[in-house]
Amino acid sequence: MRPFKYTEGKDETSAVRAVVVNRESKFLAGGTNLIDLMKEYVERPNELVDVSQLPLAQIKNTSNGISIGALAKNGATANHPLVRQNYPLLSMAILAGASGQLRNMATNGGNLMQRTRCQYFYDIAMPCNKREPGTGCGALEGINRIHAIFGWSDKCVATYPGDMANALYALDAVVRVKGANGQERTIPIQDFHRLPGNEPQKDNNLEHGELIIGIDLPKNNFANKSYYLKVRDRASYAFALVSVAAALETDGSNIRQARVVLGSVAHKPWRSGEAEKALVGKPATDATFNAAAEAALKEAKPLAHNGYKVELGKRAIVLALQRAMNGGAE
Amino acid sequence: MPKYIGKEMSRVDGVAKVTGKAKYAAEFKVPNLAYGFIVTSTIAKGAIKSLDTTEARRAPGVIDILTHENYPKPAPPASTELKPEINANVRDKSFRALASNQIFFNMQPIALVLAETFEQARYAARLVKATYTPEKQLTEIAGSLDKALVPNPERAAKPRGNPAETFKSAPVKIEAEYTIPIEHHNPMEPHGAIAFWEGEKLTIFDKTQGVYVVRRHLATSFNIPEVNVSVVSPFVGGAFGSSLRPNYYPALTAMAARVIKRPVKVVYTRTQMYTGHGYRSDTWQKISLGAERNGKLTALIHDSRNNSSTFEDWLENTTNYTRTIYACPNAHTSQQLVRTDLSTPAPVRAPGAVSGMFALECAMDELAYELKIDPLELRLINFTDVNPDTGKPYSSKALRECYRMGAEKFGWKDRKFEPRSMRDGRLLVGWGMATGVWGAFQQAASVRIALKSDGSAHVASATADIGPGTYTVMTLIAAEYLGLPAERVKFELGDTKFPRAPVQGGSFTTASVGSAIYESAQNIRRKLLEMANKDAASPFKEAKIEDVEMTDGKLQVKNDPSRFVNISELMRRNNLEELVDVHEAKPSPEREKYATGAHGAQFVEVKIDPDTRVVRVTRAIEVTACGRIMNPKTSHSQEIGGVVWGIGMALQEATEIDHRYGRIMNPNLQHYHVPVNADVLNVETIFVEEDDRIVNPLGIKGMGELSMVGIPAAIANAVFHATGKRVRNLPITPDKLL
Ligand SMILES: Cc1cc2nc3c(=O)[nH]c(=O)nc-3n(C[C@H](O)[C@H](O)[C@H](O)COP(=O)(O)OP(=O)(O)OC[C@H]3O[C@@H](n4cnc5c(N)ncnc54)[C@H](O)[C@@H]3O)c2cc1C
Ligand code: SF4
């Protein structure tokens, strides 16, 4: 670990300022991702500005839904009555991730910011454009079983590995951030993460020093027809091979609104407009779900070792939609 | 009636472990300690061109940096460590850190940074800059099977009967290839040591399965007498074979301590463990089975290839039990290795056996389907009561009973033969079974017993307790035969100040050290009897040693509690504070007349999601016949642990190498998966006890390794039964079943 300075964030403004003035500083929240990466020498900040004590942990009703503090813990968020009742999809997604201990440390802001689990990213002896731009992508022609099938570039084929964000994409979340100039701004969740393009070092569209302060969820009618399905190599404590956040609103037997978001298939949660188009206005039948699944994976571009994600993705979508229709029951 | 043997005893070291009082090697407090951090190579083969330590040396707290350029010349390695008596002429060619600029494997140590704190050493280690002259490496056996060689042709197995011909003409046959990737032990405790010198005397706290092995290694490394080296290793947080050999770090740590004249601590990071000790080798196996239509095996051919390093020849003993587990007149087995630019493999729990039996027991299942005979029935048809190679009868082999009991408990008779024929709701259900086998080994081991006049005893042997509960079982055996309450017996291990014992491996510790305690207790009894009989009023006149026992602090005539002396009083009368016996127990020659072994049967249920193809092992019943059970509590733990590992091997574990770089890409517990609690559902372990006093006086056979031997095959067979898909390449991850 590189020696670093530790600064306690006293309030939002001073915390933001502390990071803005130092290109090599970072916010510290739960530390469950950042500290690990520092030990591996992947992240090398020379200053940590600890925001974990800022009063940004509330979860409360708003005029149009709820607002969730950036520093609320993942565990507390998943178990909050407002979330459980109105956004069970979010609960399910969070609880599918990590472990109880980690969820009690991890914050919602940190979760959105978590970095990829690409093995080459973690090994500083290996080429990786995300870690060190210009060194090449180790995974492109290397071991890429857990990598992207959508939206990758030859500069980077990594996936965003998290679970919570997949639900947030389905729920049309809006991220509230405190800007470098002290102003607040909002970022619709689908504009939060980026595709790798030529700058895979940028995971998302946050500027250096911008602090996530909260996540807003608008009201919706998905609560009784949603499901988060996570397929993984072991029953717990593993990142998804493929995951699906599915949500439906029906009108009699027809689908009025639908959300299909695939996780661990791209550099960002992959909301499938094609699948949603195939669902809306159609009867909620297996045939419709199958058509949606086919549509969702049609443009997939698998790599050498992750071709299975195409078939698995289709099956996971159908299963998640069936369970969503079933009110979340298996 | 035994007081302790066969009864549940909780771990005597349990409280110390959960309260943190138990000290592991790297936890000892030593004043003036310096911390070493290992720098590793980023190429797999070639040579170091330059090593620049300038910046690292300037980093805060750095004391010194050892590299091949300044590393003092160690003594030339002597004979190989593990079995010096057998391999006296075989030079130890194990990897030595910083011996030259040559690179033999990726993540090979190239420098050791020494600093005042661990964090300073780790940071400075990042600042060491190396350049290389790389060469093209080979790091897998796939594609290089034709490069396989037989290292010791004179020791290679000879065919029994005429397997090739019989196979050709067999009415029913199957032939299949199976692969197992490299797997790592991943014990919880990382390997580490603290070393310091007092003149020419070296003390090292080390994580090891055998303190005497480390002593010998260090004595030869520094060319000093063995008695000058003290090795201390009271607690080990799992090792599973990774600490049978000394590994490279103890000598490195000791050398660093010598160079900077300070105590030094070196601990592997999790990542460094992946090349800092051995691993289960990359294995390819081909099994050819020929049979009559009635299921009788006529030919059995097992061809096995595994990877080794370029500097040592390691053969994975996969075919060890192939020739003996089934009655088959014609059999041939061969083992070959492919030299690769990786570190040398090592024994990993049930080495060879679990790999070989994965292939053989899957092949038996394939044959059962070819024959349309129930898989269990096929095993019974080919059951053998003698070792087919030697014709010797087994001293005991309750395997039939294991099959019977397992099948009954599991409900095997309700199994539908056809694949994909069983369901639970939408889930595919599969039932599979397999056979487990391991040796019933015993090795020479010594112990010292000091019986005290205050009614307590101190018992010591330089064995290890890497987790199975050795402290507990030895306390139990000593308490039993010294006739003392277990609380009054203190057993110590893991220190070269105690009498010599073999490494903890091969599942032979309880049989070896337990026998020594049993026999030594007998010596104590004899001495007490002689002492008592010096007294004119002795109640034991005429009594032979077999006629008396030690019980409740008394020496008494068996079956006649009225004739006794109080041992404490007897010792005090003789002005004896301590009665000491040092004894070595050896395997009895009687064993030679028999075949020996431990066996088991495993029955497994899997449920598989028909869509995602995620496999869950919902039920596992393991029935084991491994002699007499000393402590059922820790014994069941061993068996359950074996089943859990078997689940990992079948479904999850694989060390992944990027062969372009020859580098392990998942050397950590986030990318290398082992089972978590949620993967382990119902596991039931059952013992069928055997009363076998031929293997050793207490009738003990090993169990720790046996416990996992059949599990991967049973799971793979269950997966086939559920899906109709035969996966022959471990691990069986969901993508392979889509
Ligand atoms: C073993 C393990 C298993 C895991 N499994 C899963 C899983 O299955 N699914 C899953 O989704 N996740 C998983 N995780 C990831 C975990 O969810 C994240 O580590 C966690 O959410 C990060 O939150 P944190 O508060 O600890 O962030 P930190 O580690 O403190 O920070 C992470 C990053 O976010 C930045 N940051 C933090 N807060 C803010 C803020 N308010 N504004 C701007 N930037 C900020 C930091 O500067 C840093 O760059 C796992 C983690 C581990 C260690
Ligand atoms: S996929 Fe992205 S993160 Fe992985 S090696 Fe390539 S550039 Fe780095």
Image (tube, coloured by chain):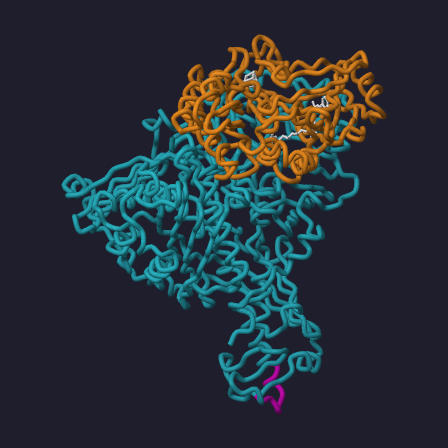
- Can residue B446 be seen here? The reply is yes
User: Is residue B153 in view from this perspective?
Assistant: no
Please provide percent x and percent y for residue B62: 76, 27
Q: Please tell me the colour of chain B.
A: cyan
Magenta stretch? B530-539
What residue do we see at 54% from left, 89% from top? B541
x%, y% of residue B599?
38, 56
Residue B544 horizontal/vertical position (percent): 50, 82
Asked which quadrant contains residue B477, the reply is: bottom right
Shade representing chain A: orange
Picture quadrant of residue B35: top right
Seen at 50% across and 58% down, the residue is: B636
Q: Quadrant of residue A299?
A: top left
Q: Quadrant of ligand 2?
A: top right
Q: Is residue A127 above or below residue A98?
A: above
Q: Nearer the viewer, residue A232 or B224?
A: A232
- In magenta stretch: residue B658: no
For the residue pair B146 and B375, the one nearer the viewer reads as B375
Task: Write the residue at 79% across / 39% down.
Answer: B32
Q: Main secondary structure of the magenta part?
A: loop
How many discs mark residues in the rendered view?
A: 0
In-image side of B710 versus A71 (left or right):
left
From the image, which quarter does the N terminus of chain A lie in? top right
